[in-house]
């Protein structure tokens, strides 16, 4: 599933080509995504200008003067930019946004768990986004905030990190990698972390996410960026997907368990 680095990579790839551009047409070849694309969306967007592009958690927010188009990539979605020699759509190319300057933004989603939603509100007033926690790369996500938020929570720290009301965008891959970098076992009760450990963990999360963005995110199956390129952060994984392989720090075999129905990878020696 595309996580924050993949969504941020996508945003940075499409933003220069679509901001300030006028929509010429919206072509919907398959409306049945996670939620059905509304019937009149093509009429709403035709002739409208994009005034800004943003990311909130794993949502891409395309801002028009009359409202906000939200795109969620789901488990297998991606967005491609085409500028010249627009190729014929493939089987899972479900939506095109065509612009008057000839650029096409194409939404591809084999599993169709993504979403394209229209809201008349500006992005800071959309109910869907109202209960999200802080962005992990912004100043209000810090060690003191994390300590105060976790100090009464008995659930595993990995589960807490993947809760969008605690912090947004830290999905399964990056929770595993961040906890390893911080030396914290994913099974530990969230409330057991001391303030110093919370500071270390926040620093690890931010370092891991920034590095993942630099490397174009992770491509395990479907994800490609707006130019069709795979990410390569997966080449730097220390624990994720490495069950029974030697830890790159201490040579102890990496262990795997299931927490919250998600595969969880850790080194029993490096993490405590």
Image: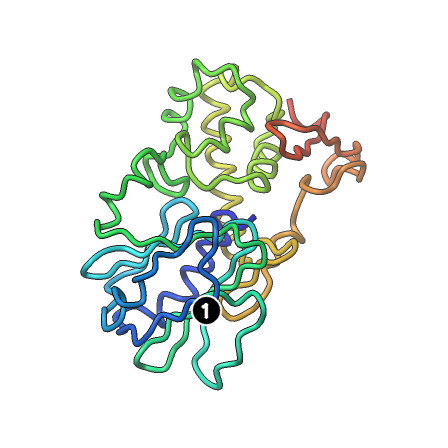
Task: Estimate the x, y position of residue 245 in percent, counting from the top left.
Answer: 80, 40
Q: In the figure, residue 135 lies in which quadrant?
A: top left
Q: Residues within 10 Å of mark 1 (few under 14, many from 20)?
A: many
Which residue is at the far bottom? Answer: 85
What kind of colouring is applied to the model shown? rainbow
Q: Is residue 55 above or below residue 85?
A: above
Mark 1: which secondary structure? strand
Task: Estimate the x, y position of residue 99 in percent, counting from the top left.
Answer: 33, 76
Along the horizontal axis of the image, is 2 left or right of 129? right
Q: In the figure, residue 50 lies in which quadrant?
A: bottom left
Q: Residue at x 39, y 56 (%)?
A: 37
Q: Residue at x 23, y 69 (%)?
A: 49
Q: Is residue 120 above or below residue 23?
A: above
Task: Estimate the x, y position of residue 258 in percent, counting from the top left.
Answer: 67, 28
Along the horizontal axis of the image, is 211 left or right of 166? right
Q: Is residue 191 above or below residue 263?
A: above
Q: Residue at x 41, y 39 (%)?
A: 136
Q: In the figure, residue 221 lies in which quadrant?
A: bottom right
Residue bearing the label numbered 1:
106
């Amino acid at each position: 599933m595309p996580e924050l680095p993949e969504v941020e990579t996508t945003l940075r790839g499409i933003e220069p080509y679509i901001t300030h551009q006028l929509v010429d047409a919206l072509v919907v070849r398959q409306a049945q995504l996670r939620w059905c694309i509304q019937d009149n969306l093509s009429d709403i967007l035709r002739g409208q200008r994009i005034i800004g592009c943003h990311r909130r958690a794993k949502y891409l927010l395309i801002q028009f003067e009359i409202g906000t188009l939200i795109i969620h990539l789901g488990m297998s979605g991606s967005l491609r930019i085409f500028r010249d020699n627009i190729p014929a759509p493939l089987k899972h190319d479900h939506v095109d946004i065509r612009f008057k300057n000839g650029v096409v933004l194409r939404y591809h989603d084999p599993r169709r768990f993504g979403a394209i939603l229209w809201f008349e509100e500006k992005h800071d007033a959309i109910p869907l986004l109202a209960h999200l926690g802080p962005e992990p790369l912004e100043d209000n996500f810090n060690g003191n905030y994390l300590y105060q938020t976790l100090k009464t929570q008995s659930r595993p720290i990995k589960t807490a990190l993947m809760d969008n009301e605690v912090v947004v965008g830290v999905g399964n891959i990056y929770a595993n990698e961040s906890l390893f970098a911080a030396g914290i076992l994913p099974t530990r009760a969230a409330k057991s972390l001391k303030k110093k450990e919370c500071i270390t963990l926040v620093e690890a999360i931010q370092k891991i996410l920034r590095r993942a963005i630099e490397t174009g995110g992770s491509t395990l199956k479907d994800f490609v960026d707006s130019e069709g390129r795979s990410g390569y952060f997966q080449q730097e994984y220390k624990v994720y997907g490495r069950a029974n392989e030697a830890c790159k720090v201490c040579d102890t075999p990496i262990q795997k368990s299931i927490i919250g129905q998600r595969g969880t990878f850790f080194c029993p020696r490096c993490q405590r």
